[in-house]
Amino acid sequence: MVRADEREAQGLDESVLERGPSLLAVAKGDANLFLWAGGRLEMPVTGDKVVDTTGGGDAFTAALTAALLRKLPYEQAAHLATAAAAATVTQAGGRPDLS
């Protein structure tokens, strides 16, 4: 996942996919931006109060990877990855139950 500021993220379009990736996931402030050929989805980072950010990015990456390996649609993968990260940061130590 790439971290970008608001200005950088707003300028992203499908042309970045011409460099090779089929999906781009960008953390931008209070939302995650997902971009793929023919699709763009901005997922607000929601959930309970953030307690500890430890493991949030790892949970995001693991959930996104698992979803893509299962060949789930990009939109569904985005939802799962964002939810996994949100669940992780609401508990101390970065080890929530992600089932």
Image (cartoon, rainbow, N blue to C red):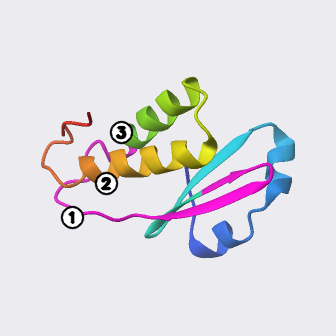
- Residue 18 position in % (x across, y down): 87, 45
Q: Secondary structure at mark 1?
A: loop
Which amino acid, by three-letter code, is at mark 1? Asp
**Who's the residue at 42% across and 51% down the image?**
82
Which amino acid, by three-letter code, is at mark 3? Ala
Which amino acid, by three-letter code, is at mark 2? Ala
State the residue position of label 1. 48
What's the mark number on residue 86? 2
Q: Can residue 1 be seen?
A: no
Residues drawn in magenta: 34-57
Which tag, 2 or 3, sits closer to the chain's start? 3
State the residue position of label 3. 59
Mark 3 is surrounded, within 10 Å at the Cα level, by few (under 14), some (14 to 19) or many (20 or more) other residues, namely many
> Looking at the rendering, in which quadrant would you find the N terminus?
top right
Q: In the rendered structure, does residue 55 fall within the stretch colored magenta?
A: yes
> Mark 1 and mark 2 in contact (Cβ < 8 Å)?
yes
Whole-Å distance between the Cαs marked 2 and 3? 9 Å
Which tag, 3 or 1, sits closer to the chain's start? 1
The tally of labels here is: 3
Whole-Å distance between the Cαs marked 3 and 1? 16 Å
Nearer-the-camera pick, 88 or 78: 78
In the figure, residue 11 lies in which quadrant?
Answer: bottom right
- Residue 69 position in % (x across, y down): 56, 24
